[in-house]
């Protein structure tokens, strides 16, 4: 997947690193010369210009991008970049700081795909917001272990099973379960798995593709490719 990140500061650069580590293509947009130099020293492609300009975003490849993350500390720049990206058909993620009140949050939330508070969310959360979909990475526990939240789909082979009937691959286990729009809780054996329900699973990277096939219903080839790249399925325009 291709991403354009506006802002190579703390939030933007960390998010870019996470995405690149998972095999995605990332272009950064930044106008501050020291930040541009730092990002380029780390091997990133950087467009040195104003992220609120359409020609800048076009140079960064917004026309071919799956999503744009406007992650600067300037709300006006972020919102303008998201509106340009939306015009180009991209998924849009808008950074908004804690200082802004709920009224402002609601105003902008109606115009973009997702609004994030990086002070709460962190880089892995910003990455999830960009990916969207039915699979959400929560934490990398060790180099080979990841905690993921998966949403049951109609295509999932386990749709209609109970927790007790669920047989995950070795080296994976269910940590929590939540009904659609409900809170996550410790799983009960008699809970039934229905479309929209969520499971939090701890899994070795080697079996993540098998877990995805069971709980999300991806084909074997899709599951292997997506598990390797860290991408999510089920979000229009960003798969």
Image (cartoon, helix red, strand yellow):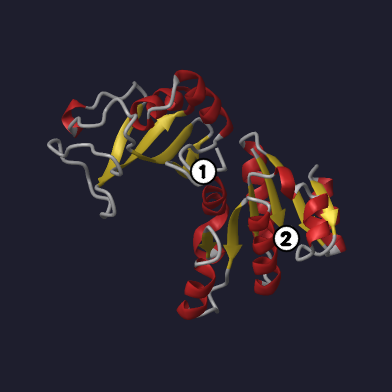
In-front residue for pair 163/1:
1
Measured from the top left, where is residue 130 in percent x and y? 57, 50
**Residue at image coords 76%, 62%:** 51
Q: Which mark is residue 236?
A: 1
Q: Is residue 238 visible?
A: yes
The N terminus - image quarter: top right
Asked if residue 32 lies left or right of residue 153, the reply is right
The C terminus - image quarter: top right
Q: Which mark is residue 7?
A: 2
- What residue occupies the far left of the structure in this picture? 190
The answer to which image quadrant residue 100 occupies is: bottom right
Q: Residues within 10 Å of mark 2 (few under 14, many from 20)?
A: many
Q: Which element type, helix, strand or loop, lies under badge 2?
A: loop
Query: Is 218 placed above or below 180 here?
Result: above
Q: Which mark is residue 198?
A: none
In-front residue for pair 88/225:
88
Q: Is residue 71 visible?
A: no
Measured from the top left, where is residue 221 in percent x and y? 51, 19
Measured from the top left, where is residue 178 in percent x and y? 26, 47
Q: Earlier in the sequence, mark 2 or mark 1?
A: 2
Measured from the top left, where is residue 224 in percent x and y? 51, 23
Query: Is 160 placed above or below 137 here?
Result: above
Asked if residue 146 lies left or right of residue 66, the reply is left
């Amino acid at each position: 997947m291709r991403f354009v990140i506006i802002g190579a500061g703390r939030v933007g650069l960390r998010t870019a690193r996470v995405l690149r580590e998972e095999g995605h293509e990332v272009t950064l947009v930044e106008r501050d010369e020291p930040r541009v130099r730092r990002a380029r020293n780390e091997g990133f492609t950087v467009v040195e210009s104003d992220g609120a300009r359409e020609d800048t975003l076009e140079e960064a490849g917004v026309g071919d991008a799956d999503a744009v993350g406007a992650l600067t500390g300037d709300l006006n720049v972020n919102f303008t970049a998201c509106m340009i990206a939306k015009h180009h058909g991209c998924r849009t993620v808008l950074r908004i700081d804690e200082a802004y009140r709920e009224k402002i949050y609601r105003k902008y939330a109606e115009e973009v795909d997702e609004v994030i508070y990086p002070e709460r969310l962190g880089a892995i959360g910003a990455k999830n917001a960009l990916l969207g979909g039915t699979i959400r990475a929560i934490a990398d526990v060790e180099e080979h272990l990841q905690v993921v939240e998966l949403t049951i789909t109609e295509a999932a082979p386990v749709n209609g099973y109970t927790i007790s009937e669920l047989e995950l691959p070795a080296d994976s286990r269910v940590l929590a379960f939540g009904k659609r729009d409900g809170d996550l809780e410790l799983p009960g054996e008699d809970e039934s798995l229905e479309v929209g329900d969520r499971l939090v699973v701890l899994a070795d990277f080697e079996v993540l593709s098998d877990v995805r096939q069971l709980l999300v219903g991806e084909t074997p080839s899709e599951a292997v490719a997506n598990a390797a790249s860290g991408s999510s399925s089920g979000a229009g325009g960003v798969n």
